[in-house]
Image (cartoon, rainbow, N blue to C red):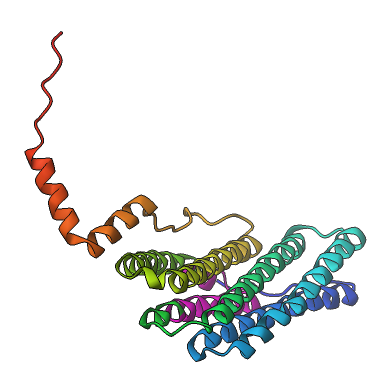
Amino acid sequence: MTMATQQHIVSSYDEELEHLNKTIMQMGGIAESQLDRAIQSILKRDSAMAQKVVEGDHKVDELEHEVANFTVRLLALRQPMAVDLRNIIAALKISSDIERIADYASNVAKRAIALSQFPEVNLVQTVPRMGRQVQQMFKNILDAYAQRDAEKARRVWKSDEEVDEMYTSIFRELLTYMMEDPRSITVCTHLVFMAKNLERVGDHVTNIAENIHFFVHGKPMPENRPKFEESYYKVMKQAEQDAFPENAKTAKKKAKKAPRKKPAKE
């Protein structure tokens, strides 16, 4: 569902709201580019590209400060109500989420710089695949914001579970790889942190989706946030069994042979 724009008697008020929305889209465009280059730097092992991502992070920070100052001014001078108030509050919250997304892109780029110093491993490709999924989510949510499309935002919101599943799968795979070859621990650790940063980007995209829904409808999402839950103990246990199947078999045999405890007499 999209929402038609509302015209105000004072035209400068419309211009101010339009400026606010354009600044949010500008922030989103920069952050999206930062995320794309961070992912590309992993694939290409391009530390120079990754360094540019790190150095460019301040642009999004500056725009977030601009949005914060502008929204305070609007709230003080215009005293907005109803949909205008929701628009301004949503913009303030969304700008914070976009700034965090840019920070995570910068973190991925820093890890890419460190990773380029080590020999390449096959598992490096798994993180960029997750990155492309997150990148598409971010692009779609920016489109939903521009179009004021709550239904599109909801679809993006529901897709976050796929990202959580991908992260858990990558975590398990990297953990197994580290157990099988301790020499890969440093490289795999960098990859785990990269995947975690991308998973957090997905979480911030769902925050944006929730704010778009509230802006359009004036009420929160009717469903609980989608979240794939699997305990780290379970993941690590499975990884250990995958890496050392003979240990798992031995443990099962011991469990079968172990005498059962007699129930205590009353």
| Residue 124 screen position, x and y as percent | 42, 80
Q: Quadrant of residue 14?
A: bottom right
Above/below status of 173 relative to 119: above
Residue furthest out toward the right: 77
Extent of the magenta region: 128-155
| Residue 217 screen position, x and y as percent | 61, 61
Q: Is residue 263 left or right of residue 98?
A: left
Above/below status of 177 relative to 261: below
Mark count: 0
| Residue 258 screen position, x and y as percent | 10, 36
Quadrant of the rendering where the N terminus is positioned: bottom right
Q: Nearer the viewer, residue 49 or 141?
A: 49
The majority secondary structure of the magenta stretch comes to helix
Camera sees residue 20: yes
Q: Nearer the viewer, residue 2 or 252?
A: 252
Q: Is residue 193 left or right of residue 60?
A: left
Above/below status of 214 relative to 49: above
Q: Is residue 147 magenta?
A: yes
Q: Is residue 228 magenta?
A: no
Camera sees residue 23: no
Q: Residue at x 88, y 77 (%)?
A: 11
Residue furthest out toward the top: 266
Q: Is residue 61 left or right of residue 229?
A: right
Residue furthest out toward the front: 183
Q: Nearer the viewer, residue 148 or 241?
A: 241
Q: Residue at x 13, y 51 (%)?
A: 250
| Residue 110 screen position, x and y as percent | 61, 76
Q: Quadrant of residue 96?
A: bottom right
Quadrant of the rendering where the C terminus is positioned: top left
